[in-house]
Amino acid sequence: MLASRITAPKDKNMASSIPVAQNIPDIDGDSALNVSSSAGQGFLFQTCQAVVAWLPVLLAAISGLCAWLYGLKPQWRETKITNAPVAAYRSRRGPSKRDWTTLDFSKTPPIAADHDWATTEERPYRPWHDGPHYVTMGIQKSALDDWVEIDKTYLARYNYKRYLYATHLEETIAFLPCSVEPAHEALTYLVDFLPRRYPAMFEATAVGIRNKVTGDDWDLRCDSATWDAYTPLQVMGLLTTEDWFIMRTDDDDNKTTRLVAGANCFPAGWKLRERMGHSLWEIHAGKVPLYEKNLAKSMDRFFLRLRADQAYMRFNYAVDVDKELFHIHSHHNLTAEEQAARSGSGPVTLEQLHLRVERQVLQRLPRTGAIAFSIRTYVTPITTVTRDRVWAKALRTNVNSYSPQVAQYKNKALWEKVLAEHLDEVIGPEDGDMEG
């Protein structure tokens, strides 16, 4: 029970314990006055005891009345939460308005009445500012309506994913048994979301969802033959441009979050199977600059406290020397020899430089408590990015401020000379050269 009734203690001898001034010889006035005073003090003491005993009940009644008057009537029911770390965190924080158990797309509006995915441009995300580069999580709130983004690259990315699933299945799909239930839960929510947000592209059916663009008619029932050929995250990847992952709290350590499934066609220089089952620490420590000092604790706390009714997103960016989306070979922390191999037969040219941006969205799944993690990748020629002089100037400022660790991580030595020359042409030279 969340509430228990408080009962005032009763003293059976209370009445007999109160002194009464009767049958007392009136020896003198002072004596009678003293006896009467003693009796009065005893009665007052017992009365105060009774008031104190009933005070919590009185305060609770007043509190309940005030809550009702302000429309904050408490719900005295317990909610079953299957994710132990979330339940533990909630118990530490006490009652709140935070919603750990609801993910509702019933009010999701269509993106636009006249939306045409084939003519919609990619969003020009530029995740840097005109100032020093800091290593932070960069987390920001995201609306549920923007869970996925669909634009004119949709069909080309769909076809490329089909090709990669057919030719590189080992590199694009991986999962652990504990991920099956949350993966199906994530797919269920996505199938609910897409026809509401993009009704011109998707249609809900009695057995699943129909893709009006590709012609795919997905039967998603438990006994469907779909699961003989596909995983839930693979279906999600073919419905959207995003890559999809499931992260789950460790069964033996409720403070550790692990990667347990993925459908990853557009990796930024890493191999899915090498990270399967790894914790956040194992994925990032020793690779991401200052992770141990600046990010590890805050990332662990964030993943544990993520709730179902609020999605979050973050961005990262890199300057790359090609536009390939399927990057399974590392393009971070490259040695001089590896950088030479990446640049090809000669020095890097301006035409090779591309901006690679990832939009990462994290969404808690209410039933299983796992996290659906999506990555949408944008690859844009640097010459397109620098058409905006404001962003070009900010990029130069940001890149110039890289610490040695960040510069190594982002392979700055590979592309800095050609980028610096290009930025000088676009916005004019600055005092001093680009430094490492």
Image (spheres, grey):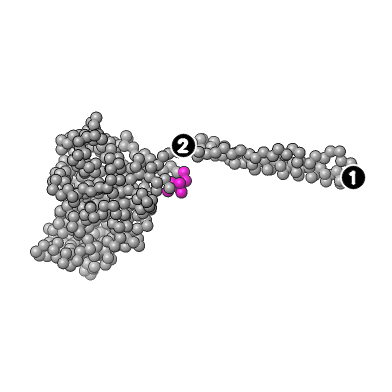
Q: Is residue 383 visible?
A: no
Query: Magenta region's main secondary structure?
Result: helix
Tell me if 320 is positioned left or right of 63 in this view: left
**Does 108 appear above or below 415?**
above
- Image point (20%, 59%), residue name: 330
Disc 1: which residue:
28
- Image point (25%, 59%), residue name: 394
Classify mark 2: residues with Cα within 10 Å, few (<14), some (14-19) or many (20+): few
Q: Is residue 251 visible?
A: yes
The quadrant where residue 224 appears: top left
Q: In the drawing, what numbered circle is on residue 336?
A: none
The quadrant where residue 38 appears: top right
Disc 2: which residue:
77
User: Magenta span covers which residues?
Assistant: 89-95
The quadrant of the picture occupied by the C terminus is bottom left
Q: Position of residue 21 (x, y in %)?
A: 82, 40
Tell me if 296 is positioned left or right of 379 in this view: right
SS at mark 2? loop
Kind of residue indicated by mark 1: Asp
Q: Are marks 2 and 1 in contact (CB under 8 Å)?
A: no
Q: Is residue 92 magenta?
A: yes
Q: Where is residue 151 in the image (x, y as percent from the top left)?
A: 19, 43
Kind of residue indicated by mark 2: Arg
Q: Which residue lies furthest to the bottom in this view?
A: 432
Which of the pair 41/352 is nearer the observer? 41
